[in-house]
Image: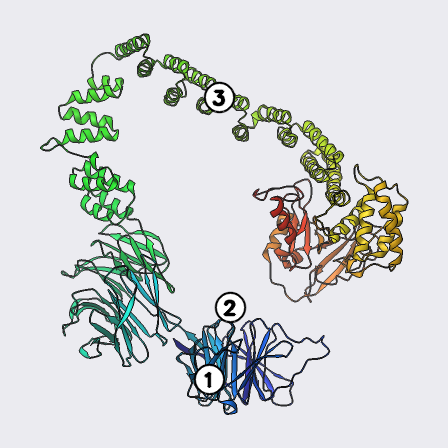
Amino acid sequence: MRAVLTWRDKAEHCIYDLAFKPDGTQLILAAGNRLLVYDTSDGTLLQPLKGHKDTVYCVAYAKDGLWSPEQKSVSKHKSSSKITCCSWTNDGQYLALGMFNGIISIRNKNGEEKVKIERPGGSLSPIWSICWNPSREEHNDILAVADWGQKLSFYQLSGKQIGKDRSLNFDPCCLSYFTKGEYILLGGSDKQVSLFTKDGVRLGTVGEQNSWVWTCKVKPDSNYVVRRSCQDGTISFYQLIFSTVHGLYKDRYAYRDSMTDVIVQHLITEQKVRIKCKELVKKIAIYKNRLAIQLPEKILIYELYSDDSSDMHYRVKERIVKKFECNLLVVCADHIILCQEKRLQCLSFSGVKEREWQMESLIRYIKVIGGPPGREGLLVGLKNGQILKIFVDNLFAIVLLKQATAVRCLDMSASRKKLAVVDENDMCLVYDIHTKELLFQEPNANSVAWNTQCEDMLCFSGGGYLNIKASTFPVHQQKLQGFVVGYHGSKIFCLHVFSMSAVEVPQSAPMYQYLDRKMFKEAYQIACLGVTDTDWRELAMEALEGLEFETAKKAASCHGCRGYFLKKRGETNNDLFLADVFSYQGKFHEAAKLYKRSGHENLALDMYTDLRMFEYAKDFLESGDPKETKMLITKQADWARNINEPKAAVEMYISAGEHVKAIEISGDHGWVDTLIDIARKLDKAEREPLLMCAHYFKKLDNPGYAAETYLKIGDLKSLVQLHVETQRWDEAFALGEKHPEFKDDIYVPYAQWLAENDRFEESQKAFHKAGRQQEAVKVLEQLTHNAVVENRFNDAAYYYWMLSMQCLDIAQDPAQKDVMLDKFHHFQHLAELYHGYHAIHQYTEEPFSSHLPETLFNISRFLLHSLTKDPPLGISKVKTLFTLAKQSKALGAYKLARHAYDKLQGLHIPARFQKSIELGSLTIRSKPFHDSEELVPLCYRCSTNNPLLNNLGNVCINCRQPFVFSASSYEVLHLVEFYLEEGITDEEAVSLIDLEAPRHKHENKWQEITSNSQTLRLDETTDSMRDDDPFTAKLSFEQGGSEFVPVVVSRSVLRSMSRRDVLIKRWPPPLQWQYFRSLLPDASITMCPSCFQMFHSEDYELLVLQHTCCPYCRRRIDDPGP
């Protein structure tokens, strides 16, 4: 840990307190009667604030707040002594007070004392600073207390002390937690700020001053610390940097945690063990079964309990109680090595210096490369490019080589014959240690490691890539972040930031590099590090073909086919052996050539005969006319058929090319496998035998193979008929997508099949896809009528929505555009009515309702505003008014309830509602003649409160702006529809909104433009460009006339909008897109991408979870589009 001074300043007056802005960008100081505001990034004094006539003693930024200006009084409580400090718990429920008489009082929010802690020093030890630990990971609230008895203590919320008092040896003046409660900062009479652990262990000094440090604060969510000295007004701003302290040996990695603990991690088994040192850990070194930890005043030497490679239990072997200063620490079996700039010191475990080496330049890298206990070798790299090997028991260093550039990283191969160096130019250089020859070099390296199990393999990292190099072959690369620190077998150990991980790297790539050069033994060594079964088999085959029998045998054993490659003892004919190998591999032609070359033609003939490969046998013998050969085979097949050996006959017919006869026999006997083989081997030009195969496949109930055959010869019409006959609709649909000319042949039978199976919804969709619009609409209208008659109003709403979308689809035809668009709007309106009325019907007909009273109240009002003189079929005005009356009365809208009951008196009321309505009409008379103001709907455009019953319908009475309702709760959403200025396309508008340009301070002006239609337009001026947004400026605007004036926006206004505040209904043509702006961005709104209905996001997510689809259009959640 080290503290870096970022900036320093000195105020003219005495500084009593300071505070950070919650986001950490500014620092406020109380200096004299002024407040000084600093920029924390560079210490620039932004501005002095005046306003106090006397000295300012404390300053703080408001966060959550405890008192607000609306409160008329602030509660006050007396204390037994002067309060010197205070601190709230994280949840704000308790306040700890530190007093001058040495007492700590913990009180609740009401000021009642819950716990009283009396310190041993009493009034002689005033409590000067307290602070609760801000960590959310602690199970209990922990209070840190610093008093002028020069003690640091910790307490629980219950008042129980945690541990013992920590002696400070100075008077503490300030205490604060660093980062998220992991460390403590203390400052006071020792004229410095010290860093402690959360348990009170001192770690080091942040910085020193010329006078007492009175206050010290931490910049929020950072590692920056500011402190000041009261007397001379000095302000210092430091950055704390915590360096990585760690050590690695093969598969064991040790690193520092929480500054005072050491964690040893086994990179293979992923086991971890924690060693608590309770002091600052300065250096760590690990080697075999040894672990060295340097603390401020001593070095601890640990050893493993046993020699087991997986043992993780360490015990203290030796303690060297002495303070050391070193740059690097190395541990061996019996010694520790201290690196101090240019000097190396070797000490025994008892702390006695045995020998010392003085180098010519700074030591940049040191590593233990093994050796007998007490005689280990060290590999040392210097800044001047010199590389040395030092033995612990030898005073003289051995110069391995000297290069021109400084050394950054070193490693020696397992046999100590090669040396890999990474220099300061990020170049990886590999040398032969004996000849000093540079073998090769590779760029972009920051660390390097040899494979401990393979002499010729190394890896190096750099530029975000891991590079693996085998021998002199090209480098194999793969992406990897971090530094390579070890390479063991197939595992590469990588350090990324503060974590070490073992990366499993397959060795296939280097193995194949060796195979390409026929270096089988080296390839086998690489394969032993870890390759797949396929790689082992390939290695065995390649070695066998290269006559490397020992390697092939080993590889075959690893692959699990040990008895596969056995050469007869004493056999010397390699051609004959390879011929057997090729025959087993299925390379029959190569095997026949080798049999012939070795003089064993009879074996080749036997092979072809056993395999029934008569044609190849004839070619091999090179005798006889091909026609005669065919005739011979055909006669043999006829003979086999006559003697009732159809299998052999089929094989011979196939060999003779008589596929039709072979197909007939196979089809009559039901041999599907044989038919498959024949069909797949036939050329697509041979249509007759292939059609016969397809016929038998259909007959034998194997439509899949029939489809494959039809596809092979390109008979798509027969393929479509096959799919339709076998009702394999998915395959038929896929074929129809690729070949639209078969759409009628697919969808019409499919729709008829669906209708026959009472699946009318799917049947309607199928008619629609087939282009049979009249049949599709007819089915859908019948479904809608049935749903209404059967009181399934939710289904009716869904069917009307589907009807509207089909009308919109048909409207793309210019000849039917106007009629279809009218029908589209009509059906959309009916879908909205039935969707809302579904809840009303459930409420009045079923004993229980899942809808909230507010939802039923909103739906009733929505329906009454939307219903015309003659309501649609199935929608009851009595039920709607009855629901409105009951919910209005329950919610306090008594005036509206009375109006609803009065309306009901003029309607024909069913007998089952008569008593309830009469009773409600009487009881409502006892209620006030007014409505609750909380229920009054608000226009989000002009901020006008609208009446609960609006003669104009679902629009604002002032600005005529249509309301946008939630499709679930039917609340008025905080959305305002706006229109694009003429000349702006939808694509341009979306691109302008997506820009999300920062908003400048500018002025908006409303301009009313009157031409053939009245519009409201926003335009910007060059002089003043403030609030050029129709949704955030002058929303209290009152409409002048009775006509609706839409909001029309220009390009500049679109550019100023935020994409997350704009919802767009992207209607397909010929409809125009609709744009809506959210006026309350924090209240999330979700729009269904299919039906474009709006919902509160929470309501929509709940409904989707319940139904797994949109509640309006029933779009599945896994459907990517509308």
**Residue 821 point in image, percent of width and height:** 73, 38
Q: Secondary structure at mark 3?
A: loop
**To which quarter of the image does residue 334 belong?**
bottom left
- First-in-chain label (3 vs 1): 1
Residue 983 seen in this snapshot: no
Q: Earlier in the sequence, mark 2 or mark 3?
A: 2
Q: Nearer the viewer, mark 2 or mark 3?
A: 2
Q: Which residue sits at x=54%, y=73%?
A: 25
In-front residue for pair 408/293: 293
Is 98 left or right of 714, judged from the image as shown?
Answer: right
- Residue nearer the viewer, 261 or 770: 261
Callout 2 crowding tier (Cα within 10 Å): few <14, some 14–19, many ≥20 = few
Q: Which residue is mark 1?
A: 187
Q: Earlier in the sequence, mark 1 or mark 2?
A: 2
Q: Quadrant of the C terminus?
A: top right
Q: Residue at x 26, y 17 (%)?
A: 614
Q: Amino acid at mark 3?
A: Asp
Residue at the disc numbered 3:
715
Q: How many marks?
A: 3
Q: Nearer the viewer, mark 3 or mark 1?
A: 1
**x, y percent for residue 916:** 84, 47
Image marks 3 and 1: residues in contact by CB distance under 8 Å = no
Name the residue carrying label 2.
136
Secondary structure, mark 2, is loop
Q: Amino acid at mark 2?
A: Arg
- Label 3 vs label 1: CA separation? 90 Å
Q: Position of residue 944 (x, y in %)?
A: 79, 59
